[in-house]
Image (spheres, rainbow, N blue to C red):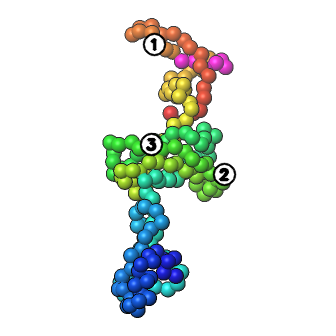
Amino acid sequence: KLIIIGASEEEIEKLEKTHTIQSYLILYAPFSGTIVESNIIQGNYIQQGTNFYKLADLSKLWIIADVYEKDIRDVKIGQIAEINISVYPDETFTGKITAVGDVLDEKTRTFKVRIEVENSDGKLKPEMFVKVVIITNQSSMLIIPKKSVLTDEEHKIVFVAMDTNNFIRKEVKLGKETNE
């Protein structure tokens, strides 16, 4: 039992010889990380099966983002996401999508997307609220105001400024529409 909780052979031999119980015990973690939860209170009795600590490697974090149902077709594993946090308003963190949920949340009409982000500097903390922008593969898409598009019979057209006084009429094919 002592070996299971991390006691060394020397400590066990010393206990066998002296029959003196130490008032403390050094525990060795199976990996390096940060203690994120402790169930140890000085003077309390520890029962079998008690978890002493919860240890986590915070050098990489998962961000779980909610993506609206209408946008889920544009989200793919491997895409880059930009993460902004109010605590660091002038800084943008980047991560990569590692999983896209298969089940729609019927109340919020969203899917869960998991983004893995490097956190070697420790600035990001578990349970922080963040704003996520997913970079989709629609980089060649031009975004224009809705009121700039005119209808001529069945054609959608815009006027492109060539200089201050000259405009050229261009027929356009409309894609995704959002707000204005």
The picture places residue 8, in percent across and down from the top left corner, at 44, 76
Residues in magenta, as a range: 153-158
Most distant residue in the bottom direction = 19
Q: Is residue 7 visible?
A: no
Q: Is residue 9 visible?
A: yes
What secondary structure is marked by label 3?
strand
The picture places residue 112, in percent across and down from the top left corner, at 58, 52
Marks 2 and 1, how far apart at CA: 45 Å
Marks 3 and 2, how far apart at CA: 24 Å
Q: Earlier in the sequence, mark 3 or mark 2?
A: 3
Q: Earlier in the sequence, mark 3 or mark 1?
A: 3
Q: In the image, is residue 58 above or below residue 38? A: above
Crowding near pointer 3: few (<14 within 10 Å), some, many (20+)? some
What secondary structure is marked by label 1?
strand
Side (left or right) of 150 relative to 18: right
The picture places residue 61, in percent across and down from the top left corner, at 47, 53
The picture places residue 28, in percent across and down from the top left corner, at 43, 70
Asked where in the image residue 78 lies, by quadrant, the reply is top right
What secondary structure is marked by label 2?
loop
Closer to the eye: label 3 or 1: 3
Residue to which mark 1 is pinned? 161
Residue to which mark 2 is pinned? 102
Q: How many marks?
A: 3
Q: Nearer the viewer, residue 137 or 49?
A: 49
Residue drawn 51% across the image and 27% down it: 143
**CB contact under 8 Å: marks 3 and 1:** no
The amino acid at mark 1 is Ala
Marks 3 and 1, how far apart at CA: 36 Å
